């Protein structure tokens, strides 16, 4: 694949999925400078990856795979805190009361806090679920079977319903 | 209706402007330059070692710094071999180009397997290369019997040296084996996840 194609693919991907990539970086990194660094790493990996992209999967799947793999590498390398599974997180009693979704800023902070506690691939399933992906797409990106994805989505929904009162405001 | 998914997807991000190709290329060049500098430092260290040892031996100055040139050279060669192995095992070229675009579990497994294989074979590429020079040097030291040192003290010194070397290298071997076992455990968990 020539440089032009690589550049074009990158531009297309960045235009279409840029905001989602920024949300992913925000979920993984609380610190603003670390977040920007992660985001730039993701964009660089994405641009480089397009030299070996030959339509193995959809552009969306490829972009999310690359972004999540960069995120995994960084989290594994940094190991800031002990990461836990969705099951373990659900077992932890929340000190706070369920968040009203109307308080968007606080709800977002709390949601990002939950994601940062999760280990791969549970964090990825939660992020992709929030991006409104279906089980098949999540399976393609994470490599989990559809059954495993379905189980995790169920746990994600339970967890979210415990932490957030949804659909109550207009 | 506002639900958590909507809140998530409509959140404001200060970093969501598209990063330009110029910035991407500049970051790629920076990364390449860092790798080149690291390699250059490794080569410089290796070349300095070879040059100093060659000069010491060719001029006969080695007698003042190292008593036995052959085991000394073997240890230098072992250092060079290990440096090369570390560089080769950590370089990006050992990674398939499309790896980053694989499903997350496959990507993580590949990374963990690569690290596990490096650790579990460390006795071969990290420990074994030092053994000929070390054993040779210890054997020569055991047969040195320097003047002015009582035989009992000399034997105790030799025993201390042998035990220290054995303890050090066994500890290194255990550290690698422990690291490999931990990675095996993580790989097992990944396999369980994959089989779900």
Image (cartoon, coloured by chain):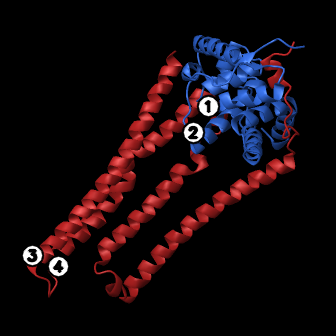
Chain colours: A blue, B red
Residue under mark 2: which chain is it in? Answer: A
User: How many marks can you see?
Assistant: 4
Q: Are marks 4 and 3 on the same chain?
A: yes
Q: Are marks 4 and 1 on the same chain?
A: no
* Pointers 1 and 2 in contact (C-beta within 8 Å): yes
| Disc 2 from disc 3: Cα separation | 53 Å
A63 w.r.t. B85: above or below: above
Report x, y in % for residue B120.
Answer: 38, 43
Report x, y in % for residue B15.
Answer: 84, 40
- Rate crowding at label 1 as few (under 14), some (14 to 19) or many (20 or more) other CA atoms within 10 Å: some
Q: Are marks 3 and 1 on the same chain?
A: no
The nearer-to-camera label among 4 and 2 is 2
Q: What residue lies at 14% left-to-right and 76% top-to-bottom?
A: B154
Q: Are marks 4 and 2 on the same chain?
A: no
Q: Which residue is mark 1?
A: A117
Q: Which residue is mark 2?
A: A81
* Pointers 4 and 2 in contact (C-beta within 8 Å): no
User: SS class of the residue under badge 3?
Assistant: helix
User: SS class of the residue under badge 2?
Assistant: loop
Q: What residue lies at 30% left-to-right and 71% top-to-bottom?
A: B71
- Rate crowding at label 3 as few (under 14), some (14 to 19) or many (20 or more) other CA atoms within 10 Å: few
Going from the N terminus, do you reach mark 1 or mark 2 first? 2
Q: What residue lies at 55% left-to-right and 19% top-to-bottom?
A: A91
Q: Which residue is mark 3?
A: B152
| Disc 4 from disc 1: Cα separation | 61 Å
Q: Which residue is mark 4?
A: B144
* Pointers 4 and 3 in contact (C-beta within 8 Å): no
Q: Is residue A54 visible?
A: no
């Amino acid at each position: 694949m020539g440089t032009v194609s690589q550049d074009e693919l990158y531009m297309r991907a960045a235009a279409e999925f840029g905001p989602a990539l920024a949300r992913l970086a925000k979920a993984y990194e609380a610190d603003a400078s670390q977040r920007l660094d992660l985001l730039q790493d993701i964009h660089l990996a994405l641009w480089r990856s397009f030299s070996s992209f030959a339509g193995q999967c959809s552009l969306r799947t490829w972009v999310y795979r690359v972004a999540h793999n960069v995120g995994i590498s960084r989290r594994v390398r940094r190991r800031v805190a002990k990461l836990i599974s969705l099951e373990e997180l659900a077992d932890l009693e929340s000190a706070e009361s369920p968040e009203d979704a109307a308080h968007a800023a606080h709800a977002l902070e709390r949601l990002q806090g939950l994601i940062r506690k999760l280990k791969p691939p549970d964090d990825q399933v939660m992020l992709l679920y929030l991006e409104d992906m279906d089980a098949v797409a999540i399976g393609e990106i994470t490599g989990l079977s559809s059954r495993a994805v379905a189980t995790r989505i169920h746990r994600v929904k339970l967890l979210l319903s415990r932490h957030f009162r949804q659909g109550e405001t207009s | 209706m506002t639900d958590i998914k909507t809140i998530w997807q409509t959140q404001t991000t200060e970093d969501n402007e598209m990063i330009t190709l110029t910035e991407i290329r500049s970051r790629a060049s920076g990364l390449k330059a860092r790798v080149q500098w690291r390699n250059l430092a490794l080569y410089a260290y290796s070349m300095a070692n070879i040059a100093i040892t060659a000069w010491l031996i060719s001029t006969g100055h080695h007698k003042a710094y190292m008593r036995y040139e052959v085991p000394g050279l073997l240890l230098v060669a072992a250092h060079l071999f290990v440096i090369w192995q570390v560089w080769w095992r950590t370089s990006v070229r050992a990674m398939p180009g499309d790896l980053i675009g694989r499903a997350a579990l496959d990507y993580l497994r590949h990374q963990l397997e690569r690290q596990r294989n490096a650790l579990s074979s460390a006795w071969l590429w990290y420990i074994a290369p030092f053994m000929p020079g070390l054993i040779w040097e210890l054997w020569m030291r055991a047969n040195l019997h320097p003047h002015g040192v009582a035989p009992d003290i000399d034997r105790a010194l030799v025993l201390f040296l042998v035990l220290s070397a054995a303890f050090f290298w066994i500890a290194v071997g255990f550290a690698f084996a422990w690291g490999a076992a931990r990675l095996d455990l993580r790989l097992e968990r990944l396999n369980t996840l994959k089989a779900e």
